[in-house]
Image: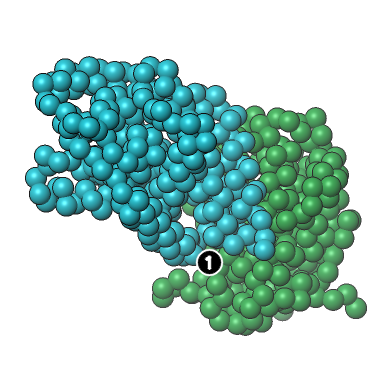
Amino acid sequence: MTKNIIEVNNLEHSYGSVKAVDNISFNVKQGEIFSFLGPNGAGKSTVINILTTLRKIQKGEARVNGYDVAKESKSVRRSIGIVFQMLCLDHEMTVAENLDYHGKIYSMPKKERKKRIDELLILTDLENKRNTLAKDLSGGMKRRLELARGLMTKPAVLFLDEPTVGFDIQTRMRMWEYLREIKKEGTTIFLTTHYMEEADQLSDRISIIDHGKIIVTGNADELKNKLGKDLIYLETSNNKIAAEILRSLKSVKSVTEDTKSLRILIGEDVTHVLPQIMEKIRGEGIDITTVNIKKPSMDDVFVHYTGRELREGNEKEKQQGTEPLGELE
Amino acid sequence: MSFEFRAIYWRDMVKFFRFKSVLFSSLIQPVMWLGFFGLAMSGSFDKLTSLIPNVSGVPVVDYLSYMGAGIIAMDVLFSSLFGGTTLMFDKKFSLLKETLASPVPRSHIILGIGLSGVTKAFIQTIIIIGFGKLIGMNFFKGYTFTETLIAVAGIMLLVAIFTLGFLFLSGTIAITIENPEGMQSILTLLSMPLFFISNALYPIDSFPAILRFLSMFNPLTLLADGIRYFALGPSFSVMGNHYIYTTADIGMSFLGLCFFALVMLSAALWRFDKVDI
């Protein structure tokens, strides 16, 4: 059995009277990519800050690479690499200097620093940018440089807090490629995200976190299969009554009312259930305007477990106009 | 013993020499003070004070040389007092985050920044002394080569302690205050009394008693006195005032500056320990 590189037991954290992290426990296995998926304000960053010893632990227990976060913070710090949510490169230093500085503050000998810088510039495709000032890099390159910096000391665990926030989909997918490469090298990756695709495509295991609690943990397929085989979206002339009717049916696992449509989870083969559902609703004099069938996605998983869409977090982001990666300019 | 402070020192120095505009202005500023203000003021002061009989039997020092010591003190004061500002921006733009999240002890961050400030202060001091000599500032008059070396070493030692004290103070404010405007106004507020209630540019003998008393505790006075002792000698007359510095006086200046630097160091350590990310 692979050993747990992160072990968290009954972790709790409050800011004043607000409970940001509410009694959570989980383990991360060595060598896997583990994601915390949840909206902004769910408590993801608090957990990452506690595990990286940037925030003092209030209640509970956490170990990283075998070291107690509360008592052995120096050893924890030596075991990890961090890519922060906000860009924090020294814009007035070159790519190589940024990496060199990092090696220096971790007391790496000169020879080792040089060797590691060469390796990492190749890994992150920044070889020809070695002597470019960080401020002259594109957003994606800056993020890759931060990734390289996080790996400078060959950490056992790499923590990434919302690593692709604000990137277009191409840049994001490239970033995922790099992360898979890093995983191949044996580094455990712990990341937080509020992007469904990111958690879905990248992670070995996902914990959905909301209101400071872990709602469910598993790999993407497991989580999706738990929802059943198929999903039906219905639009009717009276969703409210239709939902009641559907809930009384045995073959229906759950019904969620959206603004316009009904989201129906079923446990059996859709080809048999659908005619039955339609007949029943029509029988009550309700018209069905649209029918849509699809396989459950991570979005559906999220909605199913939290009872709402991730929309809230995204709206907040838009309102504040925060584009974390642009804030440094 | 760990040496991570060297990394912080290295980074600060790389950036100091990389950006020519900052480098140039920080080097040219003392020259301008001495060249414009110094020459203009010394002309009028020397004219006014030529009527005052000098103390007999004591070497007379012209105003430019007297003020030169004050210009060193003042220049070093301003650059160290505002030197911590970079820390605030580093914190604001999350630059400090990487270092704060590393195993580097917080004291090393303070030490690294302090040492780079001292290096910059040394460069400025040398420029002022060099340029001053060019325009007729009579530092080290009649000194032998060895005496000059000792005098320069003495000046540098005092400048270093003084710079550390004010950098620690400025760093403490920078890390506590969140907004640049607030920092700016606090520093300006601080620099006024420091600057005017001191003997950097003029003798304090005719000050009201209370100001004279206060000026004795002003680090700027302590530094200016120390520089004058080393550069102009233990006994000289300027503008009709007789200056006598005993070894005890200079010892007190030295201890006073050390005390100031240590208090500021503990303040900085205390504030840095509390910095959250």
- The type of colouring in the image is by chain
Count of numbered tags: 1
Q: Residue at x 54, y 47 (%)?
A: B115
Q: Residue at x 37, y 57 (%)?
A: B255
Colour of the chain lettered B: cyan
Question: Please, which chain is the residue tagged with disc 1 on?
Answer: A
- The reply, left or right, for residue A120 in relation to residue B259 is right
Q: What element does badge 1 sit on?
A: helix
Choose top left, top right, bottom left or bottom right for residue A108. Answer: bottom right
Which of these two is toward me, B56 or A270?
Answer: B56
- The reply, left or right, for residue B128 in relation to residue B238 is right
Percent across and percent down for residue B9 are 59, 45
Percent across and percent down for residue A213 are 59, 74
Give the amino acid type for the residue marked by disc 1 in the picture. Lys
- The reply, left or right, for residue A235 in relation to residue B75 is right
Q: Is residue B117 above or below residue B1?
A: above
Q: Residue at x 11, y 51 (%)?
A: B210
Q: Is residue A164 above or below residue A2?
A: above
- Residue A229 appears anywhere in the view: no
Looking at the figure, which quarter contains the N terminus of chain B? bottom right
Which of these two is toward me, A226 or B28?
Answer: B28
Which of these two is toward me, A299 or B53?
Answer: B53
Q: How many other residues sit within 10 Å of disc 1, few (<14), some (14-19) or many (≥20)?
A: few
Percent across and percent down for residue A208 are 66, 67
Percent across and percent down for residue A227 are 74, 69
Choose top left, top right, bottom left or bottom right for residue A12. Answer: bottom right
Q: Is residue A190 above or below residue B200?
A: below
- Residue B151 appears anywhere in the view: yes
Tell which chain the image draws in green. Answer: A
Q: Is residue B65 above or below residue B198?
A: above
Kindly identify which residue carries mark 1. Answer: A240
Q: Residue at x 29, y 18 (%)?
A: B39
